[in-house]
Amino acid sequence: AAEYARRGSVASALGAGSVRATAGARRAAGRRLLVGAQIALSLVLLVAAGMLGASFIRLQHVDPGFTPDHALAAHIDYPIGATFDFKRDGPTWSAFFAQLVDRVGRLPNVTAAGAVSSLPLDGDPESSGFSIDGRPTPAPGQWPSAQYGVVAGDYFRAMGIRTVAGRTFTNADRAETPRVVVVSRELERRFFPNEHAIGHRIMCGCDFTPGLRKIVGVVEDVHIAALDGAFAPGLYVPETQMPYPALTL
């Protein structure tokens, strides 16, 4: 009986040792698996960080099309009340922003002052379809599209956006004068590939009061939505001819 008990104890001990050995082996395998996963994750993060750093360096060398140095910006929403009425309130908006940019432009050390409805790289750009006078009317949903901005004052000079051809807006562009529009170099390249855009007339879907506008100038392309990717076609209308209640000075 004593011999049997000793054998039983030995067997139990051996069995327990086997269980502990198996459990230890499983824990070791689990640790190896966890370490392997951590190494793999570290490598993924390292590669991602490298790619992010390379993208950041590349974006630093992208020309945005404007000059942000020594520029200040402030968004201004003019109160429009309970209802939006362009015909009723438009002249008031136009007069307010015209006076604002004029007074700011006269401040000491201010080189130029202007305002725009959608500041480059500051949120989602506004886009609109348009048609070109003298060409077949596009089918519904087939109109070419361009990013647009409503501008006041000396916006292009304040932003350092270079004029490629023609002119930008002046104080002579008023509500009662012929309607005008300025387009980007990319819009001219895409839609007037074998001719100049200046002198052509377009109808912009963004207008509160639709009608033809004559292209009077072409300006340099600007990255509106993001620095990466190609330039999108762009067009600009004067705030004096399309009053807007919210601009960024």
Image (cartoon, rainbow, N blue to C red):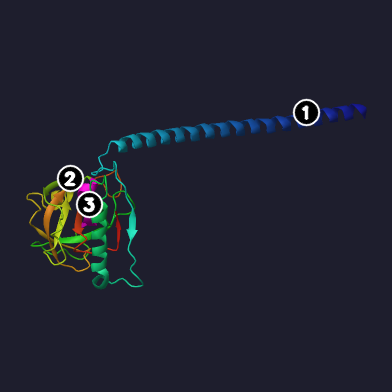
Residue 14: which disc? Answer: 1
Quarter occupied by residue 81: bottom left
Residue numbers of the magenta segment: 144-159
Give the residue type at disc 2: Arg
Quarter occupied by residue 177: bottom left
Residue 144 in sight in this render: no
Query: On screen, 70 above or below 147?
Result: above
**Quarter of the N terminus within the rendering:** top right
Q: Residue 89: x and y, percent? A: 27, 70
Q: Nearer the viewer, residue 186 or 207?
A: 207
- Foreground tag (3 vs 1): 3
Q: Residue at x 26, y 60 (%)?
A: 97
Residue most extreme to the right: 1
Give the residue type at disc 3: Tyr
Q: Residue 35: x and y, percent? A: 56, 31
Q: Which residue is mark 3?
A: 155
Q: Nearer the viewer, residue 100 or 59?
A: 100
Residue 162: which disc? Answer: 2
